[in-house]
Image: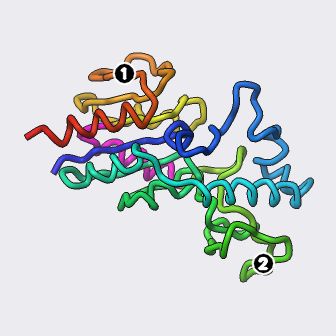
Amino acid sequence: MKHIVVLTGAGISAESGLKTFRDSDGLWEGYNIEDVATPQAWQRNPQLVQDFYNARRKNVLEATPNPAHYALVELEKKYKVTIITQNIDDLHERAGSSTVMHLHGIITRAQSSLNPNLTYPINGWELKMGEKCELGSQLRANVVWFGEDVPLISKAAGVCSTADMFILIGSSLAVYPAAGLINYVPLGALKYIVDPKIPHVGHIDNLLKIEEVATVGVVGIVDNLLKIE
């Protein structure tokens, strides 16, 4: 069974009503990244950061998977599929994908402020100040902030190195180290990029560029792949 590795970014969730991570003005939902998505922001104003992620979590829980998410599930009928996502939402899981790796964490879980390996489910959308982990530290969103390590990046690179086919969906390739994962895909593997604005990737062999939104481009790719004998 051929192995398809899919790397998804904010573009695939945009059509479910979730705003892309960083708007053209550099803001995320009207906030400077430095004020809500760094360890320093948490130290300065933990209540602001907590409120910000509570609002994002509420948005995620109100959103639903779109045809691009469901199309990737269909691929599992014929291929081994591993999804590596830069997104912190759980739309891939809710659509039914069986193997999803969250490079930047998942907003529907909480984590210890002292030990990022201690994570917990969240009941509903709100994580309150005063809710603590077993070590006695305040719980925060289980997301990787700027300036923090991306613990799964080595594992993700290893997965990419085993790909027979690679599909990049809805990512501007602006956030490293995730943006470098395409370079680990074997030379002979067929590679697709699906995005209304194709990012610059340098010289990549066997590359097909599909300048469409995810719900159009991904559904088209999947339809074609399922027809191949």
User: Foreground: 36 or 216?
Assistant: 216
Q: Residue at x 59, y 59 (%)?
A: 106
Of 147 and 199, nearer the camera is 199
Q: What element carries label 1?
A: strand
What kind of residue is marked 1? Lys
Q: Where is residue 16 in the image (x, y as percent from the top left)?
A: 54, 45
The residue depicted at 80 percent of the width and 74 percent of the height is 137
Q: Are marks 2 and 1 in contact (CB under 8 Å)?
A: no
Residue 184 percent coordinates (x, y): 38, 36
Marking on residue 132:
2
**In magenta segment, residue 38:** no
Mark 2, mark 1: which one is toward the viewer? 1
**Compared with residue 204, is residue 40 higher up or lower down, i.e. above or below?**
below
Residue at 61 percent of width and 60 percent of height? 61
| Residue 171 as seen in the image, left or right of residue 41 | left
**Residue at figure coordinates x 59%, y 52% from the top left:** 88
Magenta residues? 152-166
Tell me the quadrant of the picture where the C terminus can be found.
top left
Colour logic: rainbow
Q: Residues within 10 Å of mark 2 (few under 14, many from 20)?
A: some
Local secondary structure at mark 2: loop
According to the image, label 1 marks what residue? 209
Relative vertical location of residue 41 with respect to residue 123 in this rendering, above or below:
above
* Distance from Cα at disc 2 to Cα at disc 1: 46 Å
